[in-house]
Image (tube, grey):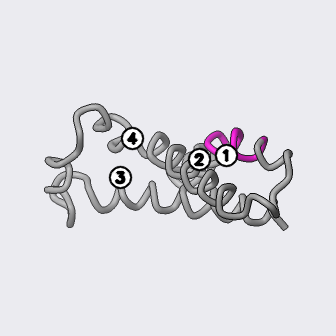
């Protein structure tokens, strides 16, 4: 069951990251003024689709692991580590 959860997290993170960076916040888009409030250290990561999606997926999967600690196994840590790479590959597929 956890395999499907991690696949859903990766897919949702890829779609949200792609929509946020490429659709909602580029120049002359709906939320283009939001970029003015980005912290300087995070500006590169928030403007890159792959970076944003990868960080989002690892953050959400860590929260899932913390909330469901008793249900998760040790192998789920491997999923958390590999989650950004899988999500970045999904973003590449979305962009092409």
In this orientation, which residue lies closer to the viewer: 46 or 95?
A: 46
Image quadrant assignment for residue 84: top right
Residue 76 located left or right of residue 24: right
Q: Which mark is residue 58?
A: 2
Q: Closer to the N terminus: mark 2 or mark 1? A: 2
Q: Nearer the viewer, mark 4 or mark 1?
A: 1
Q: Which mark is residue 48?
A: 4
Q: Do the residues bearing badges 2 and 1 touch, measured as CB atoms within 8 Å?
A: yes
Q: Do the residues bearing badges 2 and 4 touch, measured as CB atoms within 8 Å?
A: no
Neighbor class of circle 2 (other Cα within 10 Å; few <14, some 14-19, many 20+) is: many
In this orientation, which residue lies closer to the viewer: 96 or 49?
A: 49
Q: Closer to the N terminus: mark 2 or mark 4? A: 4
Mark 1: secondary structure: helix
Mark 3: secondary structure: helix
- Residue span colored magenta: 78-85
In this orientation, which residue lies closer to the viewer: 96 or 62?
A: 62
Q: Which mark is residue 83?
A: 1
């Amino acid at each position: 069951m956890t395999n499907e959860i991690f696949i859903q997290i990766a897919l949702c993170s890829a779609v949200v990251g792609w929509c946020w960076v490429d659709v909602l916040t580029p120049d002359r888009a709906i939320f283009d003024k939001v970029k003015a409030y980005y912290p300087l250290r995070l500006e590169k990561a928030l403007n890159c689709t792959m970076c944003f999606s990868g960080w989002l997926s690892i953050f959400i999967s860590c929260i899932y692991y913390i909330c469901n600690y008793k249900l998760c196994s040790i192998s789920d840590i491997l999923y958390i580590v590999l989650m950004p790479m899988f999500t970045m590959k999904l973003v590449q597929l979305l962009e092409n």
